[in-house]
Image (cartoon, rainbow, N blue to C red):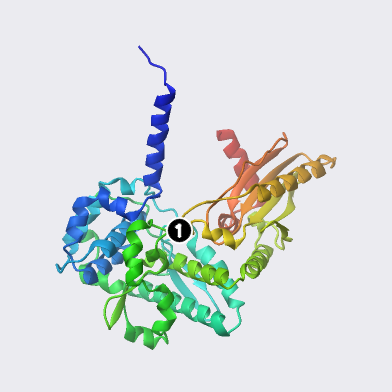
Amino acid sequence: MSKEFTEQDWDKLNALFAESLRWATLSLPINEIAQENKLLIRELSRYDPTLTIPLLAGLLTVLKLQSHCTRLEILVVLAVVHCRGRKTPNINNVVSWFALIGKSKCIVGEDPAEDVFVSLVWNTNRDYRLLEGVWENAGFYTQRVLDIIVTMPDIGQFKQIKKSVNALLEISDMVCDKAKLSRYQIGSDKKYSELLPQMIPGRNTLISRVTITFAELIKRGISLDDIAPFILNSQMRADLPSQQIGHSYLDRCPLIVQSKTHLTVALPSALSVAIRDYVIESIVDGGLIDIFNGVLAQNYSKLLFNTPLLGGPMQAPVIWKKVGDHQWSNFSLQVDDGYFISFHLFLPSVKTHADGGFKDIYHYDGVITDALQTSINEVFKHFDGCDDFKEGLVVLVGCGWGKGYASDVIEMAHNHWRFESISVADFVRVSLIGYMTPSFFWRIQDGLEAVE
């Protein structure tokens, strides 16, 4: 006989889902991950950190392992926290540790890779290769921050910010050189239940990819002072167990000095967030939030002005308006006779970055949602008064520096309008696809609606 769900049953089910989500997003302290992997921790504790950390970090440069970036970063962090022995690790150990972490709840959030393995960014000096890691559109958003740095004067603290960022970009490019990785190189969306020794490079090769000698740095004009903001110190190391994967001191400071001769790039996949975190932290500490917000808005105006919108016209009139601490903009595009796309952009204040860094999603206050809703309602009213209007599409475009966002639901109480939401990085990417046109984008929306 079937039994109806009681309120207590629903509470248990909700608790189960909440716990699964906690592990999927790794929204838990690193010491809890260690408790989940006691056998792995016992093994790691016997091994030499000066060899084990770079060995595991080197795996983050292996193309075929792109879809396992999450577990590889976990392994590196656990090695940083727990390796205290003298044993020398080998590839067989790597294979074993990969399998052990794969049996835990830590990897339930691993998804097949959807982006390039290596992106490209640039400043006034030259181009630099950058590993995307687990961070969505890392190269795109890092470029937005680099564009802001270019506008800084070459004096005082600004000069040091430039030197430090350039130094880490050089190190990123050095890692890619050592791993023989090229710009915009594709990784793999394949996932493995286990590794075989012959599937990955040898121990010394992996270690060498993330080992940077001080002699190499000097040759590139980089001093220890330049990279000091990105070096993990002993106190940071001690605090790691209480922090979270993706929002830890190691993400912010991924360089570990191993001896008087060299350092290890412990998280080569996190250099993009290390750069952005450092710049934003410096901006906030310097009381320059409004300047950062304004320059970032100008950068997006220029970018979209020079972008063929959805493969169509260029010179988009992006004029930002302030609402509270945030900014928004809107403009429309005619797709065909009677058919219009109304773009509504929003850009949060960088001060929201303090709320969980890049890992946690920022939930917008009602001020910006209300402004967007009012703007959309005014568009409805305007086109209702146009005799030739037939249908419209509202496209909400979220701008920023790479932090996730969520807002209240936008009400679309109009039979002749549809709604689509997209990040600015994806919006620009879609616009640059060779075969894309506004009318083709419209037909895609027709197809998606038909499927739904």
Q: Residue at x 15, y 69 (%)?
A: 86
Residue that carries the numbered disc 1 in the rendered image:
135
Q: Nearer the viewer, residue 61 or 26?
A: 26
- Can you see residue 341? yes
The answer to whether residue 195 is left or right of residue 265 is: left
Image coordinates of residue 416 in percent, x first then y, are: 73, 36
Element on which disc 1 rests: loop
Image coordinates of residue 306 in percent, x first then y, are: 66, 65
As drawn, which residue projects farthest toward the left?
A: 87
The answer to whether residue 72 is left or right of residue 11 is: left
- Amino acid identity at mark 1: Trp
- Can you see residue 265? no
Image coordinates of residue 155 in percent, x first then y, are: 58, 85
Looking at the image, is 312 positioned above or below residue 181? above
Image coordinates of residue 418 in percent, x first then y, are: 67, 40
Res. 31 image quadrant: bottom left
State how many labels appear: 1
Q: Quadrant of the C terminus?
A: top right
Looking at the image, is 172 positioned above or below residue 224? above
Res. 43 image quadrant: bottom left
Q: Quadrant of the N terminus?
A: top left
The answer to whether residue 220 is left or right of residue 400 is: left
Q: Residue at x 38, y 40 (%)?
A: 19
Q: Residue at x 32, y 58 (%)?
A: 241
Q: Nearer the viewer, residue 440 or 168?
A: 168
Res. 428 image quadrant: bottom right
As drawn, which residue projects farthest toward the top?
A: 1
Q: Residues within 10 Å of mark 1 (few under 14, many from 20)?
A: some
The answer to whether residue 429 is left or right of residue 369 is: left
Q: Residue at x 77, y 42 (%)?
A: 380
